[in-house]
């Protein structure tokens, strides 16, 4: 018999467009060194378009048969992700296969944005001019292992996500888990769930940014491998946004470090 430690379904969603995404784009196109955002990264809200994107995705999740909707929602505590999660959760409604007919909705700090440290809020130009030695070091080491002072590498993020997966397999076997977080979180989960190499995940990252409110999903298949495993179903699925007439955006996050 297949081991059923895994959830039945896992969805990975990047938050809707944020005010930080917009500010970063303006700074890059304007040739500025610093992204004009005054809030802490954790407090950066959704933009008006970001709310529209979240509502479009919420409609899609809400249109699923009740028995196929998420039963567990895990969110980054950052405002842009938390608000996206709230919009979707409000639309999902009660479930039919959990005690009390309510889904679980939890904020998990391990799903927070990658910490950029000293490079936070700097554009590509700002990094190159203010910290040329770090710019060169990052180009040499590569983004997977490079850790800016006060910040994290992708490996650091992956380490905390391994712990999240331990929690999910311990507490939510057989459930349908929706995770709402950030671009690097989505990519690092893909690295873990698809057993990627460094080059494979960086190649996927180079192919393009994760669109805001896009869906990457996995379904448990008991017939794969010795004990069954999660199989990839969709990557960066944006049809719900297109169907609702919401603009699709794929802007990088607050740090302007370029892709290798």
Image (spheres, rainbow, N blue to C red):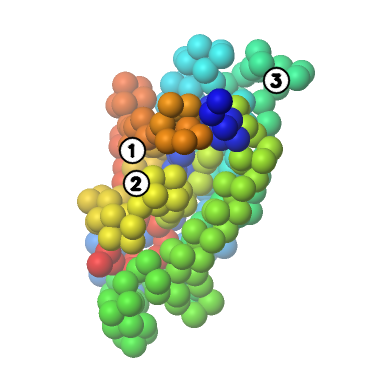
Query: Percent position (x, y) of residue 101?
Result: 71, 17
Q: Earlier in the sequence, mark 3 or mark 1?
A: 3
Query: Which badge, 1 or 2, is on the more N-terminal residue?
Result: 2
Q: Residue at x 60, y 27 (%)?
A: 174
Residue matched to label 2:
210
For the question of whether residue 19 can be seen, the reply is: no
The residue that mark 1 highlights is: 236
Q: Nearer the viewer, mark 3 or mark 1?
A: 3
The reply to whether callout 1 and callout 2 are in contact (CB within 8 Å) is yes
Placement of 60 over or under 189, stated as above or below: above
Judge by depth and name the residue closer to the eye, 232 or 257: 232
Q: Tell me residue 109's x, y (percent).
A: 63, 54
Residue drawn at (49%, 69%) of the image: 152
- Rendering quarter of residue 201: bottom left
Label 1 environment density (alpha carbons within 10 Å; few <14, some 14–19, many ≥20): some
In the rendered image, which residue does mark 3 sit on? 98
What x and y, as percent, mark residue 72? 62, 31
Q: Quadrant of residue 143?
A: bottom left
> Which tag is nearer the camera, tag 2 or tag 3?
3
Question: Between residues 30 and 151, which one lies in front from this camera angle?
Answer: 151
Residue at the spot x=34%, y=42% of the render? 211
Distance of label 1 from label 2 (alpha carbons): 6 Å
């Amino acid at each position: 018999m297949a081991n059923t430690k895994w959830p039945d379904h896992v969805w990975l969603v990047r938050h809707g467009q944020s005010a930080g995404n917009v500010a970063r784009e303006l700074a890059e196109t304007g040739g500025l060194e610093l992204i004009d955002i005054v809030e802490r990264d954790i407090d950066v809200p959704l933009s008006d378009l970001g709310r529209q994107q979240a509502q479009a995705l919420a409609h899609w999740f809400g249109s699923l048969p009740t028995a196929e909707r998420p039963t567990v929602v895990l969110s980054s505590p950052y405002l842009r992700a938390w608000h996206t999660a709230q919009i979707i959760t409000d639309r999902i409604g009660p479930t039919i296969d959990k005690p009390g007919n309510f889904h679980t909705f939890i904020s998990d700090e391990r799903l927070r944005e990658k910490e950029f440290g000293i490079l936070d809020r700097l554009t590509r130009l700002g990094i190159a001019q203010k910290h040329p030695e770090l710019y060169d070091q990052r180009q040499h080491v590569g983004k997977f292992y490079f850790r800016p002072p006060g910040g994290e590498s992708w490996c650091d993020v992956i380490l905390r996500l391994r712990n999240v997966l331990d929690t999910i397999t311990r507490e939510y076997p057989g459930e349908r888990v929706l995770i709402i977080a950030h671009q690097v979180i989505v990519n690092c989960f893909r690295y873990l769930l698809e057993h990627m190499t460094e080059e494979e995940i960086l190649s996927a990252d180079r192919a393009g940014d994760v669109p805001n409110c896009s869906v990457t999903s996995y379904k448990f298949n008991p017939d794969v491998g010795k004990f069954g495993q999660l199989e990839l179903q969709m990557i960066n699925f944006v049809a719900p946004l297109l169907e609702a007439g919401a603009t699709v955006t794929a802007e990088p996050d607050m740090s302007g470090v370029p892709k290798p």
